[in-house]
Amino acid sequence: MTITPDFRFRRLRRSPVLRQIVREHHLRPEDLIMPIFVQEGIAEPVDIASMPGVQRFPESQLGGELRRLWQLGLRAAILFGVSDNKDSCGSDTWSDDGLMARCIRTAKAAVPDMLIISDNCFCEYTDHGHCGVVVEDDVDNDQTLTNLQAQVVTAARAGVDMIAPSGMMDGMIAAIREALDEDGYHHIPVMSYSTKFASAFYGPFRDAVDSNFKGSRNTYQMDPANGREALAESMQDEGEGADILMVKPGLAYLDVIANIRQHSNQPLAVYHVSGEYAMIKAAANAGVIDEKAVVLETMLAFKRAGCDLILTYYAEDLLKWLAEG
Ligand SMILES: [Zn+2]
């Protein structure tokens, strides 16, 4: 007996053009934000062992690297400093001669039209590796906010285009907005790492920033088990004035992205983190997956879940793949 379906979805899948014209989501070069690591005290780029294809750059090569990426079509980069100048509170971050301020000035001079974002935290600038001031074995929220205010004003003075606080301190967006506005930086937007989980997927990032941090960030980053709290965290930051929200990591948290998308009209970013990058690389290098296809599928999953922007170490490859069509 022949069975006749009521409706035939396959009608719109018959040719590449048909599939293209009904495609719901697309990845564009301007969706991508590339993380860039800049290390003090090196003369040549250093490979990051756990993240094949990713390097730490010396300050002297930051401008050239950004110009190269601009030519490839990159429109936004987020800078991470790997500092030699560590102390208990991360004071290098609010020095006008500190690593981040210098990197911002270098970047803006090299590629004035590229959107230069600063990752604003303390963990790469503190000798204990925590994301703020430690009091009695825990990060003191409110002291850290005061330092964060100094840090973001320094970044703004250096010419940064957007602030991106990643420390998951309570009240951080309100504190940042107040400090920026008070110093006349009303126009500088804030992209909050608004829902950031205490994730095992960050492993290779520690290698990238040369951190020997052995502790835990569980008292400030979120429990991966909590979906309702994940929404509340981002909505709180929106209420405090965050211009762009973010979920970090990505693929294991698509439900969180979709939920925030339903509750917020702000632009939403996702951080496709080091462990996610390293897993795809390892599988590709083992010859068990098609790297380009898997990365493009992953990026579309972020878009489908509701993201506008994607921070990814695959940005350069993606720009080349998108140009190939
Ligand atoms: Zn941090």
Image (cartoon, rainbow, N blue to C red):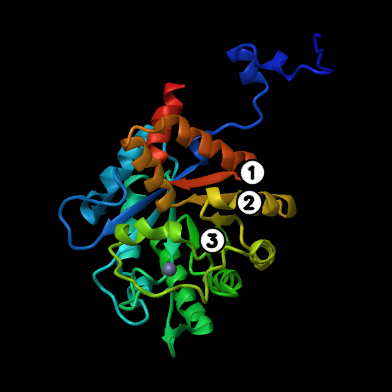
Location of residue 249 in the rendering, given as x and y in whole percent from the top left corner: 51, 55
Which of 220/319 is in front?
A: 220
- Asked if 225 appears above or below 10 in the picture, the reply is below
Which of 79/107 is in front?
A: 79
Q: Crowding at label 1, few (<14), some or many (≥20) Cα neighbours within 10 Å?
A: many
Q: Crowding at label 3, few (<14), some or many (≥20) Cα neighbours within 10 Å?
A: many
> Could you tell whether 265 is left or right of 56 in the image?
right
Which residue lies under the disc numbered 1? Answer: 305
> Could you tell whether 173 is left or right of 274 in the image?
right
Which residue lies under the disc numbered 2? Answer: 257
Mark identifier at residue 193: 3
Judged from the image, the secondary structure of the residue bearing numbered disc 2 is: helix
Amino acid type, residue under disc 1 in the picture: Ala
Labels 1 and 3: the sequence-earlier one: 3
> Could you tell whether 232 is left or right of 302 in the image?
right
Considering every residue shown, the one lying at the far top of the view is 1
Task: Please report contact status of discs 2 and 1: CB closer than 8 Å, yes or no.
Answer: yes
